[in-house]
Image (tube, coloured by chain):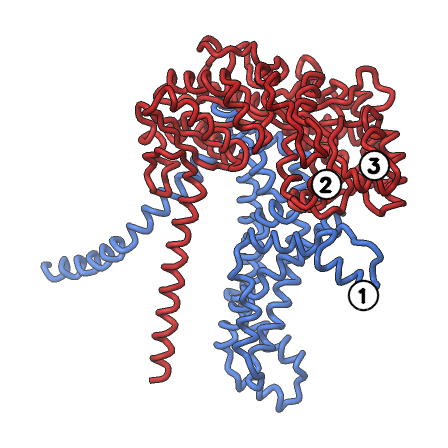
Chain colours: A blue, B red
Amino acid sequence: MSKSTRKLSLVKRQKLTGWIFLIPATILIVATSFYPMFRAFLLSFKTGIGANMKWVGFYNYARMIKDTVFIQSLKNTFFYLIIQVPIMLILALILASMLNDRNLKFKGIFRTAIFLPCATSLVSYAIIFRSLFAVDGFVNTVLIKLGILSTGYNFLGHPTSAKIIIIIALIWRWTGYNMVFYLAGLQNIEYSLYEAAKIDGASPFQSFWRITVPLLRPIILLTAIMSTNGTLQLFDESVNLTNGGPANATITMSHYIYNMSFKYVPNFGYAAAMSYIIFLCVAILAFIQMKVGDKRYEG
Amino acid sequence: MKKRIFAFFMVTTLILALTACGAKDNTTDNASKNTTSDTKNTSNDTKSSDQVDQTSGDNTLTVWCWDPAFNIYAMEQAAEIYKKDHPDFVLNVIETPWADVQTKLTTAAASGDLSTLPDILLMQDNAFQKNAISYPDAFVDISNSGIEFSKFSSAKVAYSVVDGKNYGVPFDNGTVIACYRTDILEEAGYTLDDFTDITWSQYIEMGKDILSKTGKPLFSCTAGESDVIMMMLQSAGASLFDAEGNPYMVDNPVLVQVMETYAELVSSGVMIEVNDWDQYVGSITNSTVAGTINGCWIMASIQTAEDQSGKWGITNTPALDGIAGATNYSNNGGSSWAITSNCKNVPLAVDFLANTFAGSVEFYETILPSSGALATYLPAADSDVYGQPQEFFGGEAVYSMITDFAGKTPSNNTGVYYYEARDAVATAIANVVAGADINAELQNAQDTVNFAMGR
């Protein structure tokens, strides 16, 4: 009898130790993340100017459907997501497998060079891109000198080119970041697999497609979810590179939420409701990606 | 061994770099945030902005404003003058860009904790109605405080009046001036007189000629902003809202005329659009354009190009064609001082403002020459200082000229939803320049504003 209680208490004690280690982090997360999220959820059912709020139920959510600027920002964000994330991830994969080649010289320099953009601040890189693509900026000067253009093209002044500039900026900033994940993942792939494939006569493309991609699937899934999340919350580029223009052609959801809270007549209820839409989008997309990407439990 | 030495060096450089950064941050923060007057008891703490309530003791006032060459300078001069009669008065100016003032104000007022606010803050006139109506508890009603509002121009005071109560002491104004490079005009065979009291169609006509002769556009502006639109609108006394505060864009004849004029300015090449403020100022100081039209505060930026001294001339803005009530005068920007509810010593704040910004001609005489801070305090306009010739602007007495413009400027109606309307119109104009139909775009803009107003 006494023996069994002791055994239980040992298990209990171990569990207790685990909980004690978990509690500080849990309290911090609950207090600084979950509690504000809960309050924001309540806030999203209220409306009013500034501090004068009243309950309105689902009014804010219904209102969003009719908000043309919000719909525009939603479209823009998904445009970035659909174009930019696949290009970036494929590019990162290619770069990672190239840099994983054992015969490549100066690997360290290449790796650092490709990763370096991630070390720059979001605001400063956005401002640098803005000046690069200004009417009298570096890119236009080069194009004029090469005789491709006769006068400077206002890249940020046209809807399509402005969107493309944002996508280029995002790819420049984040490709290296994702590449590092792939490089780490590649270290777990036995190099002899590639050698065996080579002996069997596989082309580099085949070994990339048949060995690298399947074995990296969990990491590709991780980067896809992280990139989706990051793109849906895109803010700095929209604010600093294009300021949402021209004519809201590049405004993102987060930028619009910011305007709604701080630039316009403050309507925090509506802003909170829009934040929850982003949250829902991220959750749904992550869920779909997990279902599609994670093959662990298949028979 | 080699590796160890290498690692040691890496660590030391890292530590050095980190500590160096930290130290640098501290000094720049102190320098930029605590621009204080001589006798200060400001804590050197970089977080002084968060501890405003503690520093605002009996004789201390904390102020938020943003431009070292302009409103901060004015505030410090005001403190000097006030100190002559109140030797123990202490002013603590914290440099806070307008965007940050707005964000901090919104955060403080929305959370209901006003203790982070200063005693006095400078507010853009365009945002005054929005903030005072959204957060009525955040500002002190100074209607019956003894400040003589009748000594300011009434159009200016109106920005800071909500429900008949005064919440602000007017400071600078943004009377619109048209600045031209007289040397470039001469090159094309024009003089400043050719551009005085003209209409936009004449402006475009001459602008095309100057462009073909000198290769320089007359004017640059920031794409995606609606400053130019708003200036043109106000010059005819029009607004984006009607008297009841409803959006008035569709079938607003003045607005349609403004949009057409703007589109023609761009398509003719007389006006170029740039992407941000820096490029805008750059286009002026680098002689990319032959002039600009903006609030008179732009003079401070123009004067940074010292090599262009004497080559600039100032006159009034073109008027709209064929609009009843169109004038050559308008306004863009300007700001007012507001006392927040966090002020522990409201009588002191009121007395300070009443004896300087709202009561001292001497004060305005001090600040004008170096800052160009044009008073909306009417008694100051008669001062001799305003009549002195300015060498940079062709030796003309530009300040008395601008004061004269200010008196002729039609007033406008900002309303609470001013920023929404501005952005909606900026969107519309960007589409119109790209070839869209004006009426359809105005309908969209009006729908957007109506939507924002919850209609």
Q: Which residue is mark 2?
A: B223
Dot 3: what SS?
helix
Q: Residues within 10 Å of mark 1 (few under 14, many from 20)?
A: few
Q: Residue at x 39, y 68 (%)?
A: B13
Give the percent coordinates (x, y) of residue B225: 69, 36
Is disc 1 placed on a helix, strand or loop? loop
- Chain letter of disc 3? B
Which residue sits at x=31%, y=23%? B58
Between the C-alphas of marks 3 and 1, the distance is 30 Å
Could you say which is closer to the camera, residue B231 or residue B308? B308
**Disc 3 designates what residue?**
B265
Q: Amino acid at mark 2?
A: Ala
* Same chain? Circles 1 and 2: no
Q: What quarter of the picture does the N terminus of chain B occupy? A: bottom left
Tell me: A170 left or right of B446: left
Q: Position of residue A163 (x, y in %)?
A: 70, 51
- How far apart are the alpha carbons under marks 1 and 2? 27 Å
The amino acid at mark 3 is Leu
**Mark 1–mark 2 contact, CB under 8 Å?**
no
Residue at left offset 70%, top offset 19%: B409
Q: Chain of mark 1?
A: A
Q: Which mark is residue A146?
A: 1
Q: For the residues marked 3 and 2, what is the alpha-carbon distance in whole angstroms?
A: 13 Å
Confirm whether circles 3 and 2 share one chain. Answer: yes
Q: Chain of mark 2?
A: B
Crowd tier of the residue under label 2, counting other residues whose Cα lies within 10 Å: few below 14, some 14–19, many 20 or above:
many
